[in-house]
Amino acid sequence: MLWVKALHIIFVVTWFAGLFYLPRLFVYHCQCHEPEALERFKVMERKLLAIMTLGAVLALGFGLWLLHWWASALGNGQLWLHLKLLLVLALVGYHLYCWRLVKRFRDDRNQHGERFYRIINEIPALALIGIVILVVVKPF
């Protein structure tokens, strides 16, 4: 089971790398006005989204495997785990929202300014802090 846990952590890191960097690309994309550079940002965003989606799918897959294994050992009363899973579900929603934003940039239909992307760039960091505290400290 340690191999599954190790692979889960590896792909969580991969996923979070993308979650941290993609909104930063959106900020730079908003600041850019040169047609050639705008096309380059579209390619970078598309490729990063593909890599982070692969990381997300594998992190979730290995996480479900661990959850299945732990389910019999944990039983009821594990509020920390339920809260962690809620944060993970929120991250999946955030990931899907980023996917939608990539499509909007691709189609030249961005509706937000760089300040918006700077703000949403903080969401994965807050989720990560919450998840790590819940998993390590298990306060509930």
Image: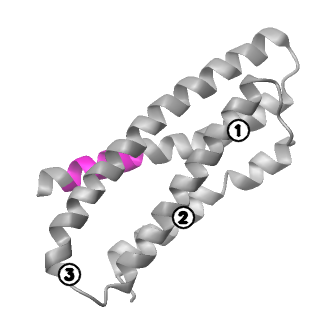
Q: How many marks?
A: 3
- Classify mark 2: residues with Cα within 10 Å, few (<14), some (14-19) or many (20+): some
* Numbered circle sitting on residue 101: 1
Q: CA distance from mark 2 to mark 3?
A: 23 Å
Q: Is residue 9 magenta?
A: yes
Q: CA distance from mark 2 to mark 1?
A: 20 Å
Which tag is nearer the camera, tag 2 or tag 1? 1
Rendered residue at 40%/47% (across/down)? 13
| Residue 128 seen from this side | no
- Magenta part, dominant SS: helix
Q: Is residue 86 left or right of residue 61?
A: right
x and y percentages locating residue 82 in the rendered image: 40, 77
Q: Which residue is mark 2?
A: 127
Choose the circle earlier in sequence order: 1 or 3.
3
Q: Is residue 126 left or right of residue 28?
A: left
Bounds of the magenta span? 5-13
| Front in this rendered view, residue 77 or 18 | 77
In which quadrant of the rendered image does the C terminus lie?
A: bottom left
Query: In terms of secondary structure, where does tag 3 sit?
Result: helix
The outermost residue toward the top is 36
x and y percentages locating residue 138 in the rendered image: 35, 82
Q: Tags 2 and 3 in contact by the CB under 8 Å rule?
A: no
